[in-house]
Image (cartoon, grey):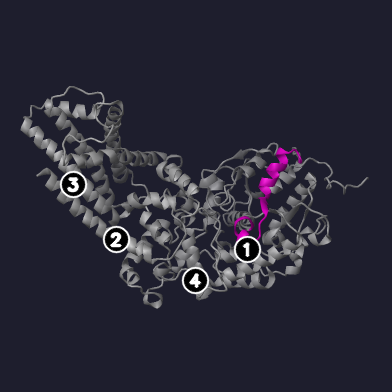
Amino acid sequence: MGPLAITLLIVAAGAFFAFTMQHRLRLLAKLGKDDRFDRPGERLKALLRFGIGQSRLVDREERLPGVMHALIFASFLVLALRTITLFAMGYSPTFHLPLLGEDNPVGRGYLLLKDVILVVAFLASAYFILLRALRRPDRMTASWEAYLILGFIAGLMLTDMLFEGSVLAIARKPFDAWLPVSSATGLALGSMGLSGEALATLAAVGFWAHICIILVFGNFLPYGKHFHVITALPNVYFSRLTPSGQLSKLDLENAESFGLARATDFTWKQLFDVYSCTECGRCQTHCPTYQTGKPLTHKGLNLNIKEHLYDQSKAILAGKKGEDLPLVPGGVVSDDTIWTCTTCAWCETACPVLIENLPRLMEMRRYQTLMESKFPQEITRVFKGLETQGNPWGLGSNTRDAWAEGLEVPRCSDGAEFEWLFFVGCAGAFDDRQKKVSRAIVKILQAAGLKFAILGNEETCNGEAARRMGNELVFQTLCQQNIETMKGYKVQKILVQCPHCFNTLKHEYPQFGGNYEVVHHAELIERLLKEGKIKLAQTEELKKLSGPVTYHDSCYLGRHNDVYEAPRAALKAVPGLNLLELGRSGRQGFCCGAGGGRMWMEEKIGTRVNQNRIAEIAQSGAATVATACPFCLTMLKDAAGEKNLDQLQVRDVAELVADALAATEAKKPEGERSSA
């Protein structure tokens, strides 16, 4: 009876699982191509770190839930061998895998580990049940499925204990240190005075219940959020290896359509992403849109896309395309959802299974902008300004170098030899407040005696905002114009003051042949301090600081490019400056609200992102907030004004360092110093 019963169960469960999975796999095969089979060494490294090692769960915020999840994951890895053994015991009760019998040290060691893991996994499951029932974290959606799955896991542990304990009780074995949990269970059952027949019944109940839970569990996985148990590890392996701040390059000359419009425009990897969403909600905890009441949560977006692709699966498998399928942007996904994203990358750095959220939204923007000319009305003037004057304000391009009036700032066109091109950027050239930062950077460069030059009126916008607002045509035009100009001057090293310029020149210009060493001014300042090329001292300007200084992390400098320490090192080097950290700082830093082109759009829904951030800064007790980004400086300055926080200063790191420069004559590059 045993072999026949277990065979029937395996065949029935396997057939049902195969039927479900073939539909999921056929749907994957019908979607767009995406080559994720390159660089296997790097992919294996990511799999070991993020998949097997669960690093985003155990070494970051909310560590206790992360550790508990990692313990359950480890339990399944350990108990996989036990599962194989139990299925085989349905055919041969004395079966054990090679080396895993009680008659050798490896087997005894495994039995001890298995027994301990039973308790660990049971307690971790109980922890999550209580967490959901009592604490109810905001990031977790109330779900009967979660309780069912946790019940399955706890049930597997209890039925294993019951089976093994009953077998030991029948054999009347004494306590076995290699099977501490099972032995304790067996001794407890033996002390109850149960007959051998009753113990055998308990053993059978434990065995068959365990087998049935496994088979039901496995077949339930593809129908809910726990599909990630099957797909998460491969999703991590196939994750993006390009920088998070790099969008894909569009073939504007040959492509018939642009962006993501309908279900068939998703790639197989984008479907695999939504298969893998664990619905843990970690993408929400520091998301500026979610935290300020905007209609975008990446967990919700994943569910929305998955449900839509399932709904359209028959049409997709039948080969339908184009207008036969409903529009995703503006239909399945609302316009507000598409356009409220600040591209801050919190969601992507928080996701334990490395789901790629930003590319999907950016592709939807591309479709609406390039194919439908549908975008927030206020950015019409931004596109016009970029097209006609090379800056988002539409100010005269012939005044781009007016900020440098009165300074001895060489232009590339002067013909002088230079090491660094100072790419000033639109804000540094046209925004009155940011012009002061440009001048502070020049002061530092001159004090260090570096050979540098600017393009002056030959410079144009790097195009970053246009690209993130979906206008790839404007971006590529500006990009190629800058590359051609810089090629003419044989530029190799570029210094920028804007993280958006930094990210674009460093990661996106190489797509078009523009390969440079790109350095943010905070990084260069840190380097100059280490090399002793600039000296800082307590100056009269510094004495005007009325209290502690805190630092606000730029998303495009921090999360997108992992530059966290350089600005802090520069600030710590300023004599007398008392640096304090915000609650949300570093990788958890909160967005200013300007990224993804949001600098140029109205914020009509929920609380303003910059006001949320300035409230935290004000509560920290800081008298000055330092930034390293023109957008951040503008947004925080505006928020301070809106909240009547006139006493709170907003300064760039470069300004504070420039204020601390020792009162000595600025150095001229070697070979150019006067004899006076």
Real-space Cα distance between discs 1 and 3? 57 Å
Q: Which residue is mark 3?
A: 212
Circle nearer the viewer, 4 or 2? 2
Q: Is residue 16 magenta?
A: no
Which of disc 3 and disc 2 is earlier in sequence? 2
Q: Secondary structure at mark 1?
A: helix
Q: Which mark is residue 557?
A: none
Picture coordinates of residue 259, whole percent (x, y): 49, 69
Three-letter code for the amino acid on which mark 1 is drawn: Phe
Which of disc 1 and disc 4 is earlier in sequence? 4
At label 1, counting other C-alpha atoms closer than 10 Å, the crowd grade (few under 14, some 14-19, many 20 or more) is few
Picture coordinates of residue 625, whole percent (x, y): 62, 47
**Residue most extreme to the front:** 98
Q: Which residue is mark 2?
A: 22
Task: Name which residue lies at 26% across and 50% down.
Answer: 218
Q: Quadrant of residue 209?
A: top left
Three-letter code for the amino acid on which mark 4 is drawn: Tyr
Q: Which mark is residue 512?
A: 1
Residue 18 visible in the snapshot: yes
Real-space Cα distance between discs 4 and 1? 22 Å
Which of disc 3 and disc 1 is earlier in sequence? 3
Task: Name which residue lies at 73% across and 57% down.
Answer: 491
Three-letter code for the amino acid on which mark 3 is drawn: Cys
Task: Name which residue lies at 29% across and 60% down.
Answer: 22
The magenta segment is 505-534
At label 3, counting other C-alpha atoms closer than 10 Å, the crowd grade (few under 14, some 14-19, many 20 or more) is some
